[in-house]
């Protein structure tokens, strides 16, 4: 049978000889096929089921379509987007078509935020309105201070930030589709759009305020109200560092450097945290809860936590003269090289060069410390080493991110999360306004567990063959000490007896 279109795949099922035609969708940058088309590739197979009386089994014929497995979503596209374009093979990153290099040189973080969310660079009046709304929504309700103070003094700031973003939803019930109706943000009328935009202003405006409050909790300092008249990053630095000095102004070089870093990290297509935000948003939860899930994902060491891994690696190396020895250990797989290589980029991460240049400007006012010298030595040697070049292990954005700014090690993921809020809300807005509507993300699984079996009373059960050998097959014993140990040894009414 001849195909009806050249933009299609012809698939022959060798199990039964049937032939299927699957359409290929062609866009400017990608080609794709619908995974749902494989559901039509059906094969009849025999399965064993239990008789209704429970006394026997019988064979039953059933039809089952194919499923697509893609562990880690290595080649799965779940949305069509107009926001960010990445060509990992060529090292290209563009926001709404604009090269990241041009934006970093000529734009600002908030102007780029406008671009990512609304699709075009703003006019002067449009930017003034957006800037004013964001900065006016930067102040937190005074009750939020109690939330921050409830954390231990040594709580990781990312844990604090994740929790407080989730708590914000309780302050704004008008932003909750569970309370106001599931079409709150999807009906596309003026009231819906205005409500959506207000939540965007709040989230972007409050992100640096929440981060600064988390920082000051760790420092044991009182909180500072966002000051008027400063830039987005200037206000952030003020809220973190001002100790009551009159007419305090952050250093303009550091302020501009942080603005560039925020711009570079505003979005990065459908990364792990953005996917997590959209997974939650697909259920039509409120945007604050969705953003909190993004923070939780970003906290992981394979994503935003990679920042910390780089610094810990540099600390473990020590001085620049020990870098060659460290690289040899990496080649022997005795050490892990952090900050090199990327899931998407097969050549140099385009943001890394911009950050390196920005770091050089910062060094001129801050000076270099031994950790930075070690980073520069590692960067230069790895780029010249054939072992790493052959494996496409080029420095990524994690390698230089915030190294020169003097922030605490565990604050790095927070500095990643603040600008990424822009990317999250841009994708959230795009999802809510999708012409096809919002469809809940419900992936399928390949079940590998046991078939149907009968329940056995506890006294009749036998330990499995792997019991005691495989630590994953049953709960493990936890070491108890102090009060916990004494309580286990005590007798009291209600103590479990098995």
Image (spheres, grey):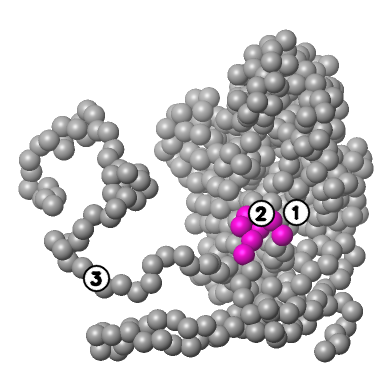
Q: Residue at x 57, y 61 (%)?
A: 280
Judge depth for marks 1 and 3 and give the one in front: 3
Real-space Cα separation, disc 3 to disc 2, in angstroms: 42 Å
Q: Is residue 459 left or right of residue 251?
A: left
Mark sitting on residue 274:
2
Labels 2 and 1: the sequence-earlier one? 1
Q: Position of residue 193 (x, y in %)?
A: 71, 68
Residue at numbered disc 3: 455
Q: Is residue 206 left or right of residue 7?
A: left
Q: Residue at x 86, y 27 (%)?
A: 357
The answer to the question of whether label 2 and label 1 lie on touching residues, with beta carbons closer than 8 A, is yes
Mark sitting on residue 269:
1
Badge 3 marks a residue whose secondary structure is loop
Q: Residue at x 38, y 72 (%)?
A: 451
10 Å crowding of disc 2: few (<14), some (14-19), many (20+): many
Q: Which residues are magenta?
A: 69-75
């Amino acid at each position: 049978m001849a195909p009806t279109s050249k933009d299609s795949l012809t698939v022959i099922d060798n199990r039964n000889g049937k032939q299927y035609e699957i359409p290929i969708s062609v866009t400017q940058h990608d080609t794709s096929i619908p995974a749902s088309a494989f559901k039509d590739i059906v094969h009849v197979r025999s399965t064993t089921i239990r008789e209704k009386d429970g006394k026997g089994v019988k064979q039953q014929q059933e039809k089952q379509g194919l499923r697509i497995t893609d562990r880690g979503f290595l080649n799965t596209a779940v949305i069509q987007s107009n926001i960010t374009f990445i060509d990992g093979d060529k090292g290209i990153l563009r926001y709404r078509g604009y090269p990241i290099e041009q934006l970093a040189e000529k734009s600002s973080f908030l102007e780029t935020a406008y671009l990512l969310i609304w699709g075009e660079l703003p006019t002067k009046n449009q930017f003034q309105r957006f800037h004013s709304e964001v900065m006016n929504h930067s102040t937190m309700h005074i009750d939020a201070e109690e939330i921050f103070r409830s954390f231990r003094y040594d709580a990781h700031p990312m844990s604090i930030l994740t929790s407080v973003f989730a708590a914000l939803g309780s302050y704004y019930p008008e932003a909750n589709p569970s309370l106001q109706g599931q079409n709150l943000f999807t009906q596309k009328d003026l009231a819906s759009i205005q409500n959506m935009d207000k939540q965007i202003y709040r989230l972007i405006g409050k992100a640096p305020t929440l981060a600064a409050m988390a920082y000051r909790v760790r420092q044991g300092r009182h909180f500072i109200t966002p000051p008027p008249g400063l830039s987005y990053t200037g206000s952030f630095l003020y809220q973190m560092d001002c100790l009551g000095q009159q007419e305090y102004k952050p250093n303009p070089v550091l302020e501009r450097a942080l603005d560039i870093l925020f711009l570079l990290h505003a979005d990065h297509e459908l990364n792990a945290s953005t996917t997590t935000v959209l997974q939650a948003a697909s259920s039509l939860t409120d945007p604050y809860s969705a953003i909190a899930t993004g923070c939780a994902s970003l906290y992981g060491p394979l994503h935003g936590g990679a920042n910390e891994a780089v610094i810990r690696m540099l600390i473990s190396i020590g001085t620049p003269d020990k870098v060659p020895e460290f690289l040899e250990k990496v080649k022997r797989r005795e050490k892990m090289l952090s900050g090199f290589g990327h899931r998407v980029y097969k050549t140099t991460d385009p943001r890394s060069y911009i950050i390196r240049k920005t770091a050089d400007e910062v060094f001129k006012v801050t000076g270099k410390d031994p950790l930075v010298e070690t980073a520069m030595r590692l960067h230069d040697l790895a780029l010249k080493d054939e072992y790493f070049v052959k494996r496409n292990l080029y420095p990524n954005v994690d390698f230089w991110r915030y190294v020169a700014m003097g922030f605490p090690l565990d604050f790095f993921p927070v500095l990643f999360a603040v600008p990424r809020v822009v990317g999250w809300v841009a994708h959230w807005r795009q999802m809510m306004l999708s012409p096809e509507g919002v469809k809940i993300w419900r992936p399928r699984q390949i079940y590998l567990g046991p078939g149907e079996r009968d329940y056995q009373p506890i006294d009749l059960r036998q330990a499995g063959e792997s019991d005691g050998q495989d630590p994953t097959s049953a709960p493990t014993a936890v070491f108890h000490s102090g009060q916990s140990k004494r309580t286990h040894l005590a007798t009291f009414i209600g103590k479990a007896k098995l």
